[in-house]
Amino acid sequence: MNDRARVVVFTCNWSGYSGLEAAGGARLGFPASVFPLRVTCLGRLSSGVILKAFEKGAAGVLLLGCPPGECHYQFGNHRAEEVLAEARQLAGLLGYRREQLKLDWVDAGDGEAFVTKVRDFIAGLNGK
Amino acid sequence: MTRGALILGGNPAGCQAALDLADAGIQVHLVESAPFLGQEDRFTLPSRWQHTRLLEVCKHPNITVWTQTHLSRVEGEAGRFRIELRQHPRYVDLSKCTACGDCLTVCPVTVPGTDRKAIHLVRDGQPGCAAIDKIGKAPCSNACPGGIHVQGYVALIAQGRFQEAIDLIREAIPLPGICGRICTHPCEVNCRRAEVDKAVAIRLLKRFVADLEPVPRQESPLPPPNGKRVAVVGAGPGGITVADRLARLGYRVTVFEKLPVIGGMMAVGIPTYRLPREVIAREYQQIQNRGVEIRLNTTIGAGGDHSLDDLFRMGYEAICLAIGAHRSHTLRIPGEELPGVVHGIELLKVINLSQQLDDPQYKATLERWLRRGAQTRVAVLGGGNTAMDVSRSLRRLGVQEVRILYRRTRNEMPAIPEEVEDAEQEGVQIEFLVSPVRVIGDAENGVAALECLRMKLGEPDASGRRRPVPIAGSEFRIDLDLVVLAIGQAPDLEQLGEGHGITVTREERIHVDGVRFMTTRPGVFAVGDAVTSDKMAVIEAIGMGKKAAAAIDAYLQGQPPHEVVVDAREVPIARRELTEEERVPKPRVPVPLLPMAQRLTSYAEVELGYTAEQAMAEAQRCLVCGPCSECLACVRACQPGAIVHEQPERLVDLEIGAILCAGDPARWGLPLAEGRGVYRLPPTELTTASAVAAQVMFDLLTERRPLPAPGPMISDREAARIGVFVCQCGGEIAGVVDTETVRRRVAAWPDVVDAQVLPFSCSPEAAEEIWRAVTANRLNRVVLAACSCCALDQICYSCTYQRVRCKANLGVFPDHPSRLMDMMPTTGKDRTPVLFEFVNIREQCAWVHADDPPAATAKATALLAAAIARARAPILKAPEKPTVDRSALILGGGEAALACRAALTGEGIAVRHLEEAPGQVRRSGGQYQVMAQDRLWQASALVLIPRDAEEQVHLLAAFDGNAPRLQPDPFGNGILTHRPGIFYCDPALDPATVGAAAAAQVAAWLGRQEMRSPLQTALVTPSRCRACATCVQVCEFGAPQLIGEDPHRTAWIDPAICVGCGTCAAHCPSGAITVPHMSDEHLEVMLEQVLGR
């Protein structure tokens, strides 16, 4: 994968997005090819939406939400896990690699974790 | 206005009670003595929740937050208290501060005993704007008649910021180098360091920075000339200050000086060893560079070069007399008329002019007076600075016997102590408690001797000094050649001649109107020693000159004089307890002096001044009394212009129904006895806070008003007319993202009618501008690229005060007279609906890609494209909002149930109470329902009140049908569960408290329903629904329900329960469910834009 290939990071409104904000506040950077998109909760994402990202050309899709047990809506991240399993299967059938789709979490306000997880995801895409 | 509740203490309990009451429809005034809420008593909640909780307090339409506020008066009784609040200024405008922190970087003051600056922000504190720690004016700054921010320049010097220091001084006075040498330094007299060891050497610090700048840097340009001319008579400090100030305002000013030199008394009365003439020349040159013309050797008056009438005829529209006091007082003792009795001021003038001018007459006069040359025996009468100057000058002329005779003691001497000390070191003898009786001698030979009396000190006189009383029979005689009178001067009014039309007082001073500085002749003003009999120091003359200049300006601009305010703030003088560390002595840095051997042989300056290192070390002795030093560095650094150092204190009268004191009542300094209408609550006990709130809801039931409903949505029939606004956030965005390029690209896109760049989109001015554009261009969609991230009425972990302010300014929240602050824009209040979209390009672009501006700019454009695509997507019609049924069903019993039931009834909520454990609880038709005793029990909210652990298991089991088990919320204070609308009373807590607290939560939850935006509720399209019940299974809150009968069975989302997470929409297999603010279509167009396809 080249560095210009675009990556979509879906964040939830809560811990995931506040990790991104904190990264900005601390002026921690990540490649500009990474496009975060904010949804209320990762539970909002269906496998259709995730596959749509691939269809529109995303080289990878990373979902960053709240830590286990801290979902703002209690159950959203469990539902996201279920959706992810389904999306993975479908993406696999379509020829996408396992590393191209990942669900993870960050603590609220943890900018460093956000940046690390994004960078690690990109490194994984590049097979490093 | 309704009578609301006053809550004292912005601690967790105070905030909890405030939110409960406000949600329930009660107006709340939340008072906190600190600048930020939630700082003293920490929340037991995780910090992300403390953050949202505090921000919700600030945002709530029913809460007015009063920070830095004290209770100054309480009158009346329960139900109708009359309260007066006194709010200390924050000195930062809450409508403008962006919390960028630039001010913190430049602030030179660290508050003693802390590690924060005098201007500061706190983490997790609200309002999230800076606050200045300024308890009052520093004693030094307060004492300065010239209005210099003294502590300010000392603080800047302490940091080595010399240019800023001199700029700050020059802003206040035109003669810093002169004041740095001869100022009587009232600042040092009032310096609190003297309580520990010795005052900070402030005068020497000023001298240091003034000398560093022999050629001043480019000044800010003067305003264009206003065509008016003013004449100033006298080029001393008062006159030249008037001239300088008026020139800076655009006047053309001419100064007429009788003497052949500039500087007035400073040039002829002060010896060069104290004030080198180059310093005078340098500072006057700068004033002349501003366009002030000085004409020497020009006498004004009937007998002089021009009369006052002449000046008016010459086109001067105002005249300011600054003629000083050059006529010496006499002693009125026999022999005073003898040759050999001279006036000190005359002697100094002759000595000084003999050095400055190439005119033999001055040397000749001097030789005549000092008839025995170095052997001349001289007595100087007086104890002021003139006496010291004469004596020390004479010593430099080689005169060996110079003695000062003074009627009182050293303590009463008006001269500056260091001058007295220097005089003595230079061999001047000072005799105290001696008063002259007569001068002995004859007209031919002049003075032979002086007869004197010994004195003692008696009672204090009018000046407060102890009056000298002669000791009978103590006469003695001193043989002398020259007697110098240095006992004060008066103005020489004779020069004005006859018919000047100016009233002179009994004290031989020009009479002026105290505010206007105008004499009895219109257009003629007077300042300085000419108008006051208190001998003026240079800095006092400068101070008066500033005021007079303002008065002359007002006169010439036709403004009423009472509006002339130079510095009329009534601010307290800062006085705080010194810390242990501050009480440790730190000796004053001694100033290098000219060696004694060189002093008496020349007129070279005695004080040599500090080096940079010495100046910084000396400035670091400052005790930062303010603690804010008013150096104004923050003002210069603040791009949005949010700093208001002149902000006044505010007094507010309120009518209040109930008072809740959260925390120690002693803090409020008023006798607040608990009783009718006055409640106490421990600062961190949230359950108690809610229980008290329940009681207050009952007290103020008649004051309850429903919360404002959200405004109407835009019509889905209108074609999109989009306005795009790109925020620069000062340099925070524009420093990285090229906002103009973004604007230009966006402006060309379809449906974009207007595109603008805004300096600060969270300011009221920006909101005004946006609404102007909406009206002018008939916009129905506004996309703002700034730091705000959503258009929802919701506070997330990363939300900020500024984002809330921005949205409130624009009217995004339910339409209400916002209480966030007092200065909401007025436009857009009666507006047509507009769809708002926000996109964060600050954290998401400028900050994370600060190292790659082109990439940040491209990304900002892409994110904006996504937001615009969203704005162009079809508008989904939100469901109608059902009316809220104010009812609650209690399941359980015991004392807590009785308390809860009573409280709910008191809040005007219909109560149903079922004591037996129900078989099954379900949600249907917007109600929780239970079948028991052969009938249906139902209500909007549910309160579970188990009497013990066993009953708790039963009650929670009643929800087993909907996985997983209902759980009390671990952060719910024993009242909340995870499920919306279901409350609980922990049997382990005090039953009366927990019962009432649960009732308060029910009232708050029902109240919040009024304000909820339908955009956040999932929406079912019945024609696409297959009633498969997937949604019912994925939502653990129970919001989706199946309604109707087959074949018309369909899903329905209960708006009271739906939290807007959108999980049901993601799982709906037929695509029948969507979320109006984030539909699949929204997600798709956004993906398309950011991925470039």
Image (cartoon, coloured by chain):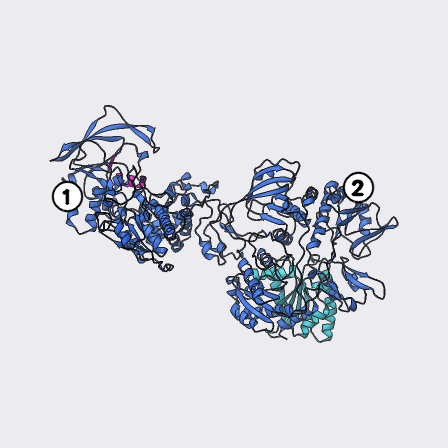
Chain colours: A cyan, B blue
Q: Relative to the observer, which residue lies in front, B782 or B843? A: B782
Residue B907 position (above or below residue A119)? above
The residue identified by callout 2 is: B894
Give the quadrant of residue B724.
bottom right
Examine the structure image and report whether residue A101 is included in the region drawn in magenta: no
Q: Relative to the observer, which residue lies in front, B79 or B1023? A: B79
**Label 1 crowd (10 A; few <14 / some 14-19 / many >=20):** few
Marks 1 and 2, the one that precedes in the sequence: 1
Q: Label 2 is found on which chain of the structure?
A: B
**Left or right: B677, with B577 as reference point:** right
Give the quadrant of residue B1086.
bottom right
The kind of residue on which mark 2 rests is Gly
**Left or right: B75, with A47 as reference point:** left
Q: Residue furthest left?
A: B444
Q: Residue furthest right?
A: B934
Q: Position of residue B518 (x, y in %)?
A: 34, 46
Q: Position of residue B643 (x, y in %)?
A: 49, 53
> Is any part of residue B21 visible from this angle?
yes
Q: How many marks?
A: 2
Give the quadrant of residue B372.
top left
The kind of residue on which mark 1 rests is Glu
Which region is colored magenta?
B413-430
**Left or right: B1062, with B802 as reference point:** right
Q: Position of residue B487 (x, y in %)?
A: 26, 37
Examine the structure image and report whether residue B419 is included in the region drawn in magenta: yes
Indicate which disc residue A71 carries.
none
Residue B532 position (above or below residue B45)? above
The residue identified by callout 1 is: B367
Label 2: which secondary element: loop
To the question of a shared chain for discs 1 and 2, the answer is yes
Image quarter (top left, top right, bottom left or bottom right) of the C terminus of chain B: bottom right
